Image (tube, rainbow, N blue to C red):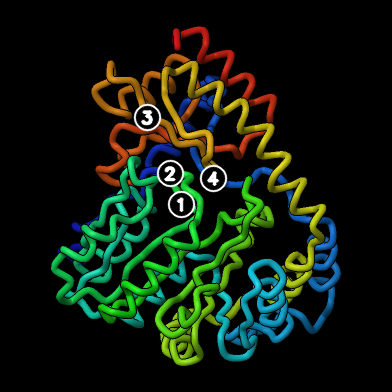
Amino acid sequence: MITPAHRLASVSEYYFSRKGKEIARLNAEGKDIISLAIGSPDMPPSAATIDTLCAEARRPDAHGYQPTTGIPQLRKAMADFYDRWFGVKLDPQSEIQPLIGSKEGILHVTLAFVNPGEKVLVPNPGYPTYTSLSRLLGCEVVNYDLLPENGWQPDFRALEEMDLTGVKILWCNYPNMPTGAAARRDTYERIVDFGRRHGILVVNDNPYSFILGREHLSILQVPGAKEGCIEFNSMSKSHNMPGWRVGMLATNAEFVRWILKVKSNIDSGTFRALQLAAAAAYANDDAWHTEANIHVYARRRHLAEDIMTALGCTFDPAQVGMFLWGRIPDCYATAEELTERVLHESRVFLTPGFIFGSGGERYIRISLCAKEDRLAEALARIRVHFAG
């Protein structure tokens, strides 16, 4: 009898994959579900990005295998992007590795740095893939708590008191998803110091710096951070390119070489036309970023806040990023009780916070990746069934 690998017992199907089937069924029944759950930007990339893709794709010599390291034009564009927005100098030839999205980066970094049975520190609440991929690869996941009374920043006293034996990686994510907590320079400084003193690799996942935030921080701005840190960045959110699967990591040259040993055995590089289009996107002007990433999302955020209020939820108005995170009223036993009621009574799909860990069990998350008319319709539907 053929049986699955034992590792499958350590994970379940991704929540949005499973729930997506139910939403598709409800839509097929004519329910017209408004999805405010997934952070998939609904706006297009810049015109220059699309024009470059189309022009390059028509070239007869553009369709062969590409280097796993990425083409020089893309690597230079990534280095220029970090210099322009973060003031961080990177050698495009040795300190950057293009990725097929950040999820791929989580896989490659874990394979390059963590042996089966060793530990990784994962924030709670936090991005579920940090946990699921670590478990699939045989790592032991150790949670560190992010608490609202601490602004969803790490509790460094608690971290210092943990048994850090066998810990290889600390995953962090600022601006934070799901909580919307902004990046802080002092947090980055303390994380870099913590990792240095304990010999732990720090990986900061940084795809939300441009959504509703006007201050652009990178962990690599901390002096000496490049020696023991890796930072991911993604074009999915900041450039409206989630389906393009273009991301990057930045770190020191030796770490890049180790990661390339893994990546070069798994994929054969990204389509050349897509890489050139991504390079064009990195050159988007300030006006494009301001309109796409601040003005549009600010208008949507107002409606999301009204939805939270209608549901009786409380939230921090200082949040940044692509979502709104809110605490549910005490009258609900669980966040899923509320989101299921909203789904089946108001036909609006929201995310229950439990999928991000135990620290999210009393929270829901609203995505801003929906047009204003759909958000307004969702608000109207919810007001019919909920008193606020």
Which label belongs to residue 327?
3
Q: Which amino acid does label 1 sit on?
A: Asn
For numbered disc 1, what is the local secondary structure? Answer: loop
* Label whose residue precedes the other's in the sequence (3 or 1): 1
Q: Nearer the viewer, mark 2 or mark 4?
A: 2
Q: Which amino acid does label 4 sit on?
A: Gly
The residue at the point 59 percent across, 37 percent down is 368
Question: Percent position (x, y) of residue 199?
Answer: 28, 81
- In the displayed structure image, the side of residue 318 where residue 17 appears, left or right: left
The answer, for residue 2, to whether it is visible in the render is no
For numbered disc 2, what is the local secondary structure? Answer: loop
What residue is pinned by disc 4? 39
* Label whose residue precedes the other's in the sequence (1 or 4): 4
- Give me the C-alpha separation between circle 1 and circle 4: 13 Å
For numbered disc 3, what is the local secondary structure? Answer: strand
Which label belongs to residue 179?
2
What residue is pinned by disc 1? 176
Question: Are the two marked residues, 2 and 1, in contact with CB atoms closer than 8 angstroms?
Answer: yes
For numbered disc 4, what is the local secondary structure? Answer: loop
Q: Nearer the viewer, mark 1 or mark 4?
A: 1
* Label whose residue precedes the other's in the sequence (3 or 4): 4
